[in-house]
Amino acid sequence: MNTFAGFLRRLSLLARAILKVVLAVVAPLAGFLRRLLAGFLRRLSVLARPILKVMLVVVTPLAGFLRRLLAGLLRRLSVVERAILRVVLVVLTPLANFRRHHPVLARGILTVVFVAVSLFATYFFDPITNYNLAAGAAMSIVIVGLSFLTGFSGQVSLGNGAFMGVGCYVAAIWANHHATTPMIGVLALATAAGGAVGLLIGLPATRLRGPYLAGMTIAFAVAFPSVLDLFSSWTNGGTALQLPQLLSPPGWIVSLFSKSTGSLTPNNMWLADVAIIVAGVAFFFMANLFQSRTGRAMRLVRENEVAAELAGVSLARARVLAFMVAAAYAGLGGGLTTLVSGSVAPSNFQLNLSITILAVLVIGGIGTLSGALIGGMVYAYSTTWINQIVSHTNLDPTGSVATSLNGIIFGALLIIVMLVAPLGIAGSLRLFIAKGLARRS
Amino acid sequence: MIRVKGLTVSYGAVQALRDVSFEAASGSVTAVIGANGAGKTTLLRTISALVHSTSGEIDLDGTQLVGKTTESIARLGVGHVPEGRGVIEEFTVEENLRLGALHGNESFSAGLADQFELFPVLAERRKQHAGTLSGGERQMLAMARALIARPSVLLLDEPSLGLAPLVTAELMKTIKELCVSRQLTVILVEQNAVSALRVSEHAVVLHVGRVAAYDRAEVVANDENLRHYYLGMAE
Amino acid sequence: MDGFLASRAVSDLLVGLHFGVVIGLVALSLVLIWRATHILNFAQGAMAAFSAYLGMSLLSYNVGYWWCAIASVFAGLVFGGITERVLIRRLYGKPEINPIVVMVGFLALLEAIATAVWGASGRAVPLPFSFVDWQLNSQTGQTIAISPEGVYQIVAALVVTILIVVLFRYTNLGLQLRAAAVAPEVSRLLGVRVSRMLTLGWILSSGVGAVAAVIVASNFGPGLTPTVMDAPFAIAFIAAAVGGLESPWGALLAGVAFGIMQQFVTDYLNNSDYVFLIALGVLVVVLMIRPQGVFSKSVSRRV
């Protein structure tokens, strides 16, 4: 026993000595790095404030701004003009009341308006922009699902890339075997598939708390390419699976636009339009979910589990439901992406995809709708931007630096945004507005 | 001896302690009493630097404690038994005591023997997990853990909480004996003001963060006007 | 006897043991960091691979394997300490999501930087011992499915595990590490330098991870790649979760079990893709039956 004690003492001394050396190296280096990081983050925050102020001016809700402007003008104008403006005000106020009393309808109208405006805009965009819009819209559906999952029920899932892959492959395989199914059918299938797999993984996964859940979804994401390989007879193994035909508009729409000028490609515009409409519908439902009793119950679950249980909210059911919804949305986004891009390959669905999705969501703003939209667009344009960086800095586009630029940028952004502004762009803006309003009252 | 001068602690807009001053001499027990929320626990936590003071001084035998870290204050010989006792349930009784002895100067076996003599019940339960102990046993463990490092100061936060009256009486007796025999500076925070006043030399009565009274214990105990500050009948 | 030792089942067992012990080592580093800091380090694999890269870059200067290995471990130790001081310090007291997301970002960042600096193609790690399976019988040419290199790796993993267990359970330093994780405030009142203990937890865990990375890279065909630790990390996480993140031996045992399972599955089902599915399946089953992990002593649901 004594020799064991002696061994322990010697082991302890050795460990202590090694650790002292390590600490001697770590302390000054870490201190330097920490000051560097702190200074960098501080400068970012200082920079962010005027940017936020500018965005505030641009993004401030139109009704409130108009109302104040009109009220101010009213004081300075002639009687006739005053009468006209009063009529306008009379129209605006009931609109605000309408929104309060009929939220769903108001949201629906808002969605329709937004979609209509976007559809109109796609008429004037070039095919590349439309393609990016389509891809971005599809991706934002995936992201909004994750926004709901993480923002509302507080579960971090890194499996959404895999769920998206489920949707992609189901859509591709079905389209290959049943070419006549209308697009909506294929999308519905992709959504259902995503939801089903989400239920399968979600049932056990949501029994786990935060880090365990994230770990399990990482495992799922890493395993996904292997799973695809297992079903290689259907998934075409390691090579890409093509859609039998590209997404094309039905005849009557083509004839409508046959009078269009030569520079427009009806196909790409159709892609963008389809994607925008689907995204609009998806976002409409998600917006309602955010505000519904279920959504609020889930938020309660995230913020205070004990209170939620006391209030009769079934914790497990709420979590599984949130997981399923997120997976279903990911499936829908995946199916749509396949329809837009025309092919799928297993190499697209590695862990990196899930991390990128999380990154753009964090940048956009967890738990918000607009954040998901921002995230989708950032994702869609990130390849273009990165390619521009590569060409501007004269890097070898096939070299290791260029290929890893995506990971470097998104990884770093994820860390920095989480440290500086964990609420993301949309979330911080919302907080800023709320604080500003509170200060004024 | 601990000297507190002009101690002020603010949590944002709330002032938990306002200009608190008193002295606690070695070999004596100083009681700190008052209603719930008067700032008693905050006072002890500030001495141990778990809470930062906005202004004021805390002097331990000539050494300034303000600005030091909790760990270094503990190593200076300040033993703090926190509210709720703070026994580590996952550890055994012996592991808890070993942890307490780490920053002391004595060998662990000697210190252990010492504490087992003081609290024989702990010797019986030495291999048991602390989570299985009763309230009174946990109190003994927490005190033994603080004492094993041979501190010069003992900060006790509501040691009688949840204990039966008989056990409380025993506990107070033990505290007094230890204080005298080891010449400790004991600051005793108690809800149970009556039993605390019985064993202390001096008493500080706190009321919403301010010192309502600071005098010899018998004087405080006999003052009718002060009673409503610590018997829970304050406005 | 030779026939038995060279048989398929025993071969699978040995190969599986070899692989599983390495997984167990990664799982051990996860358990270590969880027990010491109550954070699950998702960048563990990436940090370990990065440390291995740093150490192995000395190979270009004609430094031998042993020095490179020690350098990798040292790099791991320092890297872990720096990460804790610079990054993790900012995350204490924040909501649970924040460290998860930040570490995931760190994972992506590290792998990308490693790709940028050292390239995505593998860098071969020299082997200190022969990788040729031992010959049982020079006449029949039968071999047992283990080589000197394999034995070295198993022994190394076992030694590290034993050292960590001894450190945690029997030394005063281990006591402080454990106390700092489960009861930081009380520990500070008892004079424990809690922040230093947290840094130490990361230092040790990262060092263990570096050992694992060097071994994994030695076994992997292409050698050391930026993503070489992704799959081992995923399986090791499952193993650690099954074993219960509380127990070092549990992590090692679960890792070995998974390794053996993987080998049998790959051999008999002729397809390594089933492994992940089965691993996930096991995790699901264990979670439904005993959510706190097979080897965890706590009765209440730690998860």
Image (spheres, rainbow, N blue to C red):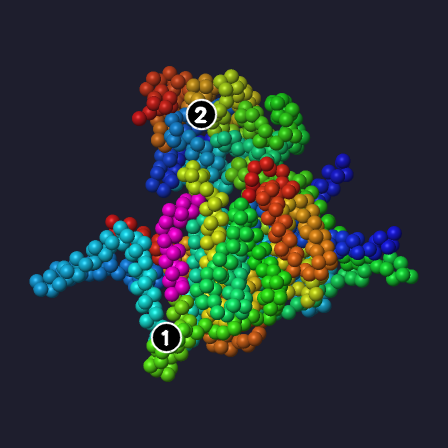
Question: From this viewpoint, is residue C67 visible?
Answer: no
Task: Pinpoint residue A214: horizontal percent, then vertical percent.
Answer: 54, 52
The N terminus of chain A, quarter of image: top right
Question: From this viewpoint, is residue B18 visible?
Answer: yes
Q: Which residues are magenta?
A: A277-303
Task: Pinpoint residue C3: horizontal percent, then vertical percent.
Answer: 86, 55
Considering every residue shown, the one lying at the far bottom of the view is A262
Considering every residue shown, the one lying at the far right of the view is C139
Location of residue B96 by image quarter: top right
Report the front residue among A286 and A27: A286
| Chain of the residue under the numbered disc 2 shown in the image | B
Marks 1, 2: nearer the viewer: 1
Q: Which residue is mark 2?
A: B190
Dot 1 falls on a residue whose secondary structure is: helix
Q: Which residue is mark 1?
A: A252
Give the overall secondary structure of the magenta segment: helix
* Amino acid type indicated by mark 1: Trp
Q: Decide if residue C268 is on the left or right side of residue A312.
A: right
Confirm whether the magenta stretch covers residue A282.
Answer: yes
